[in-house]
Image (cartoon, rainbow, N blue to C red):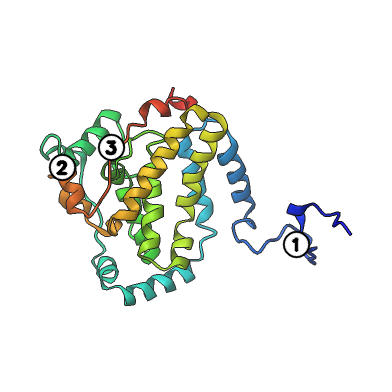
């Protein structure tokens, strides 16, 4: 007898619950603010009324109430016992203190000077988020990730435009799993996963002429992440005086090329 259930619909089971509200085994699906963020950030068009940077600001405001800090701390502690280099990184607790003037004091064409010019010429601030004193391992990891993000643009080869963001995103997404416990990476990488994929989704849906470049940026980032050492633990500030190629070599970054995504990024309305 022919099964009347469509092929792709077979194998499912009826789900029952006594709950009177929406409930899931996924902590992410259970958060209504995250469901709304996901639908909006993945499906909307680009516009100057709501810059893409606002997506990330809203996302991390939501995730701070979702993160399983106790579990993350336990996993970081276990990793420190397994990996002396990670333990030393946390124990040192280095935090950036440089200024734009410090950056511009480096030789013209150096890693630090290029970043200083970018900050000065665009009227930006060095810190993506205000500096703070971390209270636990995850907060320190998050602090340093924020402090080095723009530096990773330069080192991994991603431009300072919307599609250029995909290079450092996918470098990290492909690098961390090579060195840390999978469960830990899954917990601490949520913002990176959702932040990166919203750019892919919106480019593919609304700005498809730029989609090949988005894929190229992903590929470039993954090449760096798959070939490089755990560069997110390195003290980038020690290489500010070096030319960029030498800084990459000093910090263990391999496979980086400078990908020009500027023209493709202009297809996004807010950047046109």
CA distance separating discs 1 and 3: 47 Å
Query: What residue is shown at x 15% (from left), y 39% (from top)?
Result: 110
The mark that comes first in sequence, 1 or 2, is: 1
272 lies above or below 239: above
CA distance separating discs 1 and 2: 62 Å
260 lies above or below 127: above
At mark 3, the secondary structure is loop
Q: Which residue is mark 1?
A: 11
Q: Is residue 232 left or right of residue 166?
A: left
The mark that comes first in sequence, 1 or 3, is: 1
At mark 1, the secondary structure is loop
Query: What residue is shown at x 47% (from left), y 36% (from top)?
Result: 52
Q: Is residue 114 left or right of residue 144?
A: left
Q: Position of residue 72 (x, y in %)?
A: 45, 68
243 lies above or below 172: above
Residue toward you, 219 or 165: 219
At mark 2, the secondary structure is helix
Q: Which residue is mark 3?
A: 258
Q: Which residue is mark 2?
A: 102
């Amino acid at each position: 007898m022919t099964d009347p259930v469509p092929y792709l619909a077979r194998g499912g089971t009826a789900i029952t619950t006594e709950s009177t509200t929406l409930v899931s085994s996924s902590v992410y699906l259970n958060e209504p603010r995250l469901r709304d963020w996901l639908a909006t950030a993945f499906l909307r068009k680009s516009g100057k009324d709501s810059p893409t940077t606002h997506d990330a600001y809203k996302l991390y405001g939501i995730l701070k109430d979702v993160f399983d800090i106790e579990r993350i701390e336990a996993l970081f502690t276990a990793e420190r016992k397994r990996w002396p280099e990670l333990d030393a990184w946390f124990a040192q607790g280095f935090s950036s203190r440089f200024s734009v003037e410090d950056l511009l004091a480096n030789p013209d064409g150096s890693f630090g000077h290029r970043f200083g010019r970018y900050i000065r010429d665009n009227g930006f601030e060095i810190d993506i988020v205000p500096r703070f004193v971390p209270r636990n391992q995850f907060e320190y990891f998050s602090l340093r990730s924020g402090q080095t993000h723009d530096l990773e643009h330069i080192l991994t080869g991603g431009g300072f435009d919307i599609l250029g963001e995909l290079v450092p995103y996918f470098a990290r997404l492909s690098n961390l799993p090579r060195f840390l416990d999978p469960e830990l990476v899954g917990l601490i990488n949520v913002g990176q996963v959702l932040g990166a994929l919203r750019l892919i989704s919106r480019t593919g849906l609304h700005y498809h002429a730029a989609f090949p470049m988005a894929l190229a940026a992903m590929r470039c980032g993954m090449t760096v992440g798959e070939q490089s050492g755990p560069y997110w633990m390195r003290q980038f500030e020690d290489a500010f005086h070096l030319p960029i190629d030498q800084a990459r070599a000093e910090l263990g970054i391999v496979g980086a090329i400078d990908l020009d995504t500027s023209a493709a990024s202009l297809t996004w309305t807010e950047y046109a």
